[in-house]
Image (cartoon, helix red, strand yellow):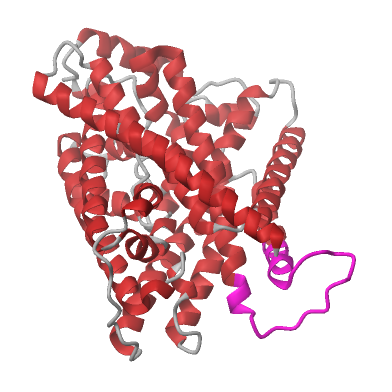
Amino acid sequence: MSFYSHCMSILSTLKLGKSSTCNQVIGGISSHDAGLIAEKWMCCDICVEENKVCKCGCKVVDERLIKASESDKDGNLDDRYRVKSDSSFLHSVINMCGMLIGLGQLSTPYALENGGWASAFLLVGLGVACAYTSHLLGKCLKGNIKSKNYTDIGQEAFGTKGRAIAATFIYLEIFMALVSYTIALNDNLATVFSGLHLNIVPWIHLSKAQFLTVLAVLVALPSLWLRDLSSISFLSTAGILMSMLIFISVACTAAFAGVESNHSIQVLKLNNIPEVSGLYIFSFAGHIVFPNIYKAMKDPSKFTKVSIVSFSLVTMLYTSLAFMGAKLFGQGVSSQITLSMPRHLVATKIALWATVLTPMTKYALEFAPIALELEHVFPTTMSSKLRMLTRGSIGSFLLLGILGLALSVPYFEHVLGLTGSLVSVSISIVFPCAFYVKIYWSQISKPTLALNLMLISTGVLLSIVGTIYSSKSLAKSMQRGHST
């Protein structure tokens, strides 16, 4: 989910040893992945990584910000207390759109076909709701200069428990998203190399696609050992190109490949809505990065407009892709649109390779927040080499565990739907509303309170029902897989 060239400069500002960055909030967000990295690079984290005592002056800056925050209850701070930010309105829109467009786009045609064309109203409705909750996060950040990221807002609202819950959901989403990426990698590798014959050693009980997936993950594994995060910034840029190529390839197939788009779509398949809602909400998951986008803006007062424009564009893209894929392939549409495209087309080959390469650009970026969190656990006396060895080993074991889980549960649509229902709906809808209501309880009007309580109730309902349905569907698929 890395979608704009500015990521190079972001990760370069995170480069180890650059103490001058300590007095600035990140100047932009590269993606869901890079945003998670940026979220963790707060002041002394740079010195923690360098295994040295902090001499960056961050403590002084933080004390000034806290003092300023306490002296200004409305959040209208003197300019000398504000963090330097240079992201324009257009740049912020690009950042937010780029972060939102990712793995979810593969499943929108499948979701529309299985939910009926009326489920497009659910897709649009969730887009509107997520745009609103993005606005709420901006309101929470405006009121407290000490809040720099998603977990800070959770702590402001509900104390250490709020921070712990928010962090738990963030890391759970990282884990489940990586499982989904690896499943997509396995599925698309099987199609890319469908004509390849491999003589696999008999005692290795793996199919051709599984064997190739293991090799692909092993190729990506060394990226987890990189100590300098700026050296993996090119991976974020690659993610941008891959996601754009997938959409363009599908559009070219619809426009120029001669595939008849005459399949009918049922009005509504009510029984499938709980699981479809999980697929839809996953497509809009990205709120953990929005505080970084807010902090990077020259004029944060325009953050709400940025949210409206970004979610409008992304919702239109998802809706058009959903109808395009559903009309092209009808009931035969795969949970990943790339697997339904005619294999002889050049556009298909491009889309397949883009989907194969995308997961390989994600592993190091997604693991980075966990790696940086580990730095706080290590004793200060631990050498840099031992830190890298420990961190790389833990990352390798986690990735191999993700690989094993993905090969054991190769059901992309069910895992993605479960991720959306179990995790994404809370991060994108329930938590932002709950944070806002708790922080501004004495200030919000009754209609606003009613709206937020309704969104919280709806989100909880979608989460519970969607998780149950997705879990049942996953269990049934696993049973069928074991019986064959």
* Quarter of the view holding residue 141: top left
Q: Is residue 376 above or below residue 469?
A: above
Foreground residue among 206 and 148: 206
Could you tell me which residue is drawn at 74 percent across and 35 percent down? 390
Residue 249 screen position, x and y as percent: 38, 77
Image coords of residue 46 (percent x, y): 54, 31
**Residue at horizontal 63 percent and vertical 29 percent from the top:** 375
Instruction: Locate residue 314 relative to residue 333 in the image: left or right.
Output: left
Residue 396 or residue 279, whichever sits in front: 279
68 inside magenta stretch: no
Is residue 293 something that shows in the picture? Answer: yes
Q: Quadrant of residue 79?
A: top left
Viewed as shown, does residue 211 lie left or right of 240?
right
Task: Depth check: give the residue in front, 283 or 383.
Answer: 283
Number of numbered discs overlaid on the protein picture: 0
Check residue 211 for magenta coloring.
yes
Looking at the rendered image, the quarter that the N terminus falls into is bottom left
When the figure is inspected, residue 197 is found, relative to residue 275, above or below; the finding is below
Relative to 142, say whether 161 is above or below: above
Residue at 56% in and 68% down: 356
| Percent of width and height locating residue 182 | 59, 57
For residue 18, say whether it is visible: no
Q: Which residues are magenta?
A: 189-216
Q: Residue at x 57, y 27 (%)?
A: 47
Which image quadrant: the C terminus?
bottom right
Residue 88 on image: x %, y %:
21, 47
453 or 438, nearer to the observer: 453
